Image: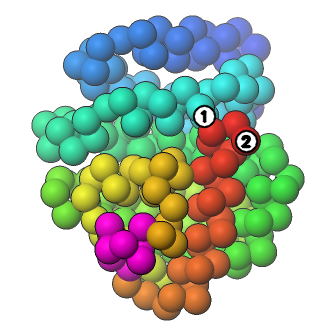
Amino acid sequence: MSKPKTAGEVEELKSEIEAMFKMSDKELMEKLPSFAPKVKGKALELLTAMPDLPQRLVKRLEESDVKKTAVEVPKASDAFTEMLWAVISALVEKKPDLKEVVKTAGDIKINYEAIDSPMKGHYELKEGKITGGPGLSETQDLKVTGPSDVLVKLTTGTIDSTSGFMQGLYKLEGNLTTGMRLATVTKKIAEALKGQ
């Protein structure tokens, strides 16, 4: 991750994020596509400046109509996805216990796709790091499909991945043992996102 040129750059981003949390959904959807790339290389510094950023992002995500956004403003949906994964990646880097869980799970490539909207994304665990973003990866070990709101709730930990699968809330393609390794990681990430 690149370092900011000045501490003022991080403060400026922090101010922009604070303003975004106060915006209406419509204003936020207009702003996100140009803003999200700024966060990507500065997420670690932003987490230091705003320790509650993950919790606030999750809260905003849970308050949004994800399906409607993905259908009506796919660029904004992709931008939020990009920003969320930048923060998750930085969170894993910042928390040694979380990094160890990711490392122990091994290398896994995951695609996820909504069945009720154009929302598609991917993430990858590799060598103790996690990266992700919008769009599908060319290769995958696992593929998760389900309604938009279920996919979001899996990421934020509102739905437990194991019980959600058993209840048929989403489908999983790929090796179930790999899925179980991933479930351990997603549970720990959800806890970290909620500040636990």
**Alpha carbon separation for disc pair 2 and 1:** 11 Å
* x, y percent for residue 5: 72, 21
The answer to whether residue 1 is left or right of residue 82 is right
Span of residues in magenta: 164-172
Callout 1: SS: helix
Q: Residue at x 78, y 75 (%)?
A: 104
* x, y percent for residue 55: 59, 32
Q: Residue at x 70, y 37 (%)?
A: 195
On screen, residue 105 above or below 57: below
Please tell me whether residue 169 belongs to the stretch shown in magenta: yes
Q: Earlier in the sequence, mark 2 or mark 1?
A: 1
User: For the residue carrying disc 1, how many other residues have a C-alpha within 10 Å: few (<14), some (14-19), or many (20+)?
Assistant: many
Q: Residue at x 77, y 26 (%)?
A: 48
* Along the line of sight, the residue nearer the viewer: 6 or 89: 89
Quadrant in the picture for residue 128? bottom right
Residue identifier under label 2? 196
Tell which residue pokes out farthest to the right in this image.
Answer: 96
Check if mark 2's residue and mark 1's residue have beta carbons within 8 Å. Answer: no
Colouring of the image:
rainbow
Q: Between tags 2 and 1, which lies in front? A: 2
* x, y percent for residue 50: 69, 21
Callout 2: SS: loop
Q: Is residue 137 visible?
A: no
Quadrant in the picture for residue 60? top left
Q: Please, what is the three-letter code of the amino acid marked with disc 1? A: Pro
